[in-house]
Image (cartoon, helix red, strand yellow):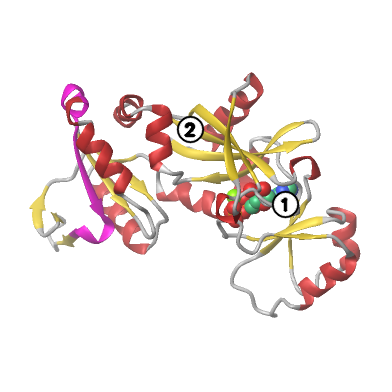
Amino acid sequence: MRLWIVTGAIAKSGAFEKSLAQGADLLKKYGIEAELYRRFDINYTLHPDGSVKLFAKGVETTAPDKLFLYGSFDAIMEGIEKTLTSMGTMSINSVESKRIAGSKLSTALLLSKHDIPQAKTMPVYRDTPIELIKKEIGIPLIVKPDNGFGGQGVELIKTEEELKQTLDALPENIHSLLLAQEFISTSKGRDLRVLMVGKKPYAAFVRQAGDPNEFRSNIHQGGHYEDFELTDEIIDLCEKTAKAINLEICGLDLLFGKDGFIIGEINDSPGMKTIIEKVGLDRFLKTLMA
Ligand SMILES: Nc1ncnc2c1ncn2[C@@H]1O[C@H](COP(=O)(O)OP(=O)(O)O)[C@@H](O)[C@H]1O
Ligand SMILES: [Mg+2]
């Protein structure tokens, strides 16, 4: 089986490179030919007779059996996926799923459709009545950009005055929605990252904020990790979510809700170094082959 791993914007490929080099024997054992590329390495020409000429690093080649897209997607990655799938390649973490994971509103709609527990969410604009937000979401509340990451722009709003200021500061035309969300106070400063491979959870760790006043648990915000044992509740919730989003490899962030875990967000490109360490290259490769 030929596998292409194609990395996107801001994706670090070091963990892949190292694992593929160290796992040469395993790859051989499973008959996998794995090639690692940046999205810029792939070119293709669509010929008028309907044929496609494909190039990897400038050398003409044939389409692989499988494609694993890693990192945030853009038009380049999307074009590669469309072209390769038209040539019969199977995409393991599809752009369609990555697009949903990349939007907190799309994720919320998907979770609702599948009856998966989450925090109440409402897009808000400059003129959204404060009374309506208070009634629907309540105060304190969280606001966050639809497509942020690393905790950037995620704020805890504690008073009506703060909420008013936040809405007033919004321009009339916005290109990304601002979402208001009920504050899950039982999860303040912590969440649970679950590593999913082949739609199954393999490891979980609590991410805890460094500063006691910080409500965000992102590592980027100075937090730290601690291993956490998987329970049946976590396994069920995560398997259901991975199936709904249809990502073979992902990280699920769970919040500690009052009545159990809820899904906070879905990360389509979790740290590969940690995945390979915790799950093992063997199992990782088996998933890619399945
Ligand atoms: N509704 C919420 N209630 C409590 N904490 C939250 C809520 N939403 C986000 N957080 C905290 O803020 C962090 C960042 O929010 P998140 O939605 O994951 O955005 P990002 O994509 O920027 O990581 C989360 O990891 C969590 O610790
Ligand atoms: Mg997050």
Q: Nearer the viewer, mark 2 or mark 1?
A: 1
Q: Does the magenta stretch include residue 168?
A: no
Examine the structure image and report whether residue 36 is included in the region drawn in magenta. Answer: yes
Mark 2 → mark 1, Cα distance in angstroms: 25 Å
- Of 243 and 210, nearer the camera is 210
Q: Quadrant of residue 25?
A: top left
Q: Measured from the top left, where is residue 123 in percent x and y? A: 72, 61
Instruction: Report the front residue among 39 and 206.
Output: 206
Which residue is rendered at x = 63% and y = 21% of the image? 231
Secondary structure at badge 1 equals loop
Q: How crowded is mark 2: few (under 14 residues within 10 Å), some or many (20 or more)?
A: many
- Visible in this render: residue 104? no
Task: Find residue 80 and name its label.
Answer: none
- Kindly indicate the quadrant of the structure image that contains residue 157: bottom right
Does 94 sit above or below residue 59? Answer: above
**Which residues, given as a range, are shown in magenta?**
26-43
Is residue 266 found left or right of 86 in the rendered image?
Answer: right
Name the image quarter holding residue 146: bottom right
Residue 152 visible somewhere in the drawing: yes
Q: Residue at x 47, y 39 (%)?
A: 250
> Which residue sits furthest front?
211
Measured from the top left, where is residue 190 in percent x and y? 68, 42
Q: Is mark 1 within 8 Å of ligand 1?
A: yes
| Residue 196: mark in rendering | 2
Q: Is mark 2 on a helix, strand or loop?
A: strand
